[in-house]
């Protein structure tokens, strides 16, 4: 039970960080807002937890090798498909780049929280939130 509580805390930290980034995006009327960022952060944290701790039973088997980084690498590759979907060209302008970058960052933050690296997850979320407050052309 104690392990599950730790995992839940990790997911909640990721959700909080994702919400922080999503609030700014939603405030600017972007398609990927709070819900999108929270779902991405929570799912990436869960996938990191599964990656790190979900294969203990088979890892103990003789001649079995487990690479905990494989799921994290898959998350990074997968978010590219979602991220490219928010980038579009309007006239001579390319829009959606910041949102796409925010989705990638949200995955990384979720992975960090899922790995138990709370300080860097929260620090990065706050840093990204503050950077997104810098005025830019809408």
Image (spheres, rainbow, N blue to C red):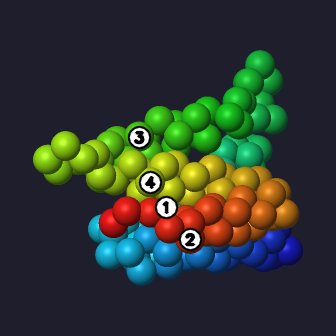
For disc 3, the neighbor class at 10 Å (few under 14, some 14 to 19, many from 20) is: some
1 vs 3, front mark: 3
3 vs 4, front mark: 4
3 vs 2, front mark: 2
Q: Residue at x 79, y 24 (%)?
A: 62
Q: For the residue labelled by badge 2, is the local secondary structure a helix, a strand or a loop?
A: loop
Q: Which mark is residue 133?
A: 2
Which is more toward the observer, 111 or 87?
Answer: 87
Residue 126 location (% of width, % of height): 70, 69
Q: Residue at x 58, y 52 (%)?
A: 105
For disc 4, the neighbor class at 10 Å (few under 14, some 14 to 19, many from 20) is: some
Q: Which residue is mark 4?
A: 98
Which comes sooner in the sequence, label 1 or label 2?
Answer: 1
Q: Is residue 29 left or right of residue 121?
A: left
Residue 123 location (% of width, % of height): 77, 63
Q: Which mark is residue 50?
A: none
Which comes sooner in the sequence, label 3 or label 2?
Answer: 3
Which comes sooner in the sequence, label 1 or label 3?
Answer: 1
Q: How many marks?
A: 4
Pick the quarter of the image with the C terminus: bottom left
For disc 2, the neighbor class at 10 Å (few under 14, some 14 to 19, many from 20) is: few
Which comes sooner in the sequence, label 2 or label 4?
Answer: 4
Q: Is residue 96 above or below residue 134?
A: above
Q: For the residue labelled by badge 4, is the local secondary structure a helix, a strand or a loop?
A: helix
Residue 9 location (% of width, % of height): 75, 75
- The answer to which image quadrant residue 21 occupies is bottom right
1 vs 2, front mark: 2
Q: Which residue is mark 3?
A: 80
């Amino acid at each position: 039970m104690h392990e599950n509580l730790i995992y839940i805390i990790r997911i909640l930290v990721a959700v909080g960080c994702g919400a922080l980034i999503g609030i700014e995006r939603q405030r600017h009327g972007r398609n990927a807002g709070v819900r999108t960022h929270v779902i991405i952060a929570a799912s990436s944290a869960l996938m990191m937890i599964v990656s790190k701790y979900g294969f203990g039973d088979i890892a103990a088997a003789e001649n079995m090798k487990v690479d905990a980084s494989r799921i994290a690498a898959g998350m990074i590759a997968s978010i590219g498909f979602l991220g490219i979907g928010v980038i579009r060209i309007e006239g001579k302008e390319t829009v959606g780049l910041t949102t796409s970058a925010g989705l990638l960052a949200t995955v990384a933050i979720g992975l960090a929280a899922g790995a138990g690296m709370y300080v860097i997850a929260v620090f990065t979320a706050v840093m990204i939130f503050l950077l997104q407050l810098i005025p830019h052309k809408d």
